[in-house]
Image (cartoon, rainbow, N blue to C red):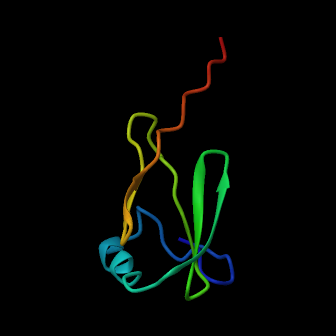
Amino acid sequence: MLAADRTLAFSWSTPAVEEAVRSLEGLAVQQGRVAGIDPALRLSDGSWLELFSGDPLEPWFVRLPGGVFTGEPTAPVDNG
């Protein structure tokens, strides 16, 4: 999660991340973009929610009023 000034506000490993995520309730998505296969959503308070999978076996998911959206895990790179 990036603050409006594009600095890191919190991530999955932030202590008490559940509380930080709850603070996003009620915000609206104003803009979206995709970098590779991972989306970034600009929220109504100016912050950006960037979604990506940190584990090659686990997808990301986000629940919005329009439904639940999921992304594929990033494919491992074959260097062989």
Left or right of residue 38, residue 23 in this image: left
As displayed, is residue 29 above or below residue 53? Answer: below
The image position of residue 49, as x and y in percent, is 53, 69
Residue furthest out toward the top: 80
Q: Which residue is found at the position 47% from the left and 66% from the top?
A: 11
Question: Quarter of the image containing the C terminus?
Answer: top right
Q: Relative to 44, does residue 55 appear above or below in the rendering? A: above
Q: Residue pushed farthest front?
A: 66
**Relative height, residue 24 to residue 55 (above, below):** below
Residue 62 drawn at (x, y percent)? 39, 61
Residue located 32% across and 75% down the image: 16
For the residue pair 40 and 65, the one nearer the viewer reads as 65
How many marks are shown on the rendered structure? 0
- Residue at 30% x, 73% y is 18
Whole-percent x, y for residue 27 in the image: 45, 84
Residue 65 at what x, y percent from top left? Answer: 36, 72
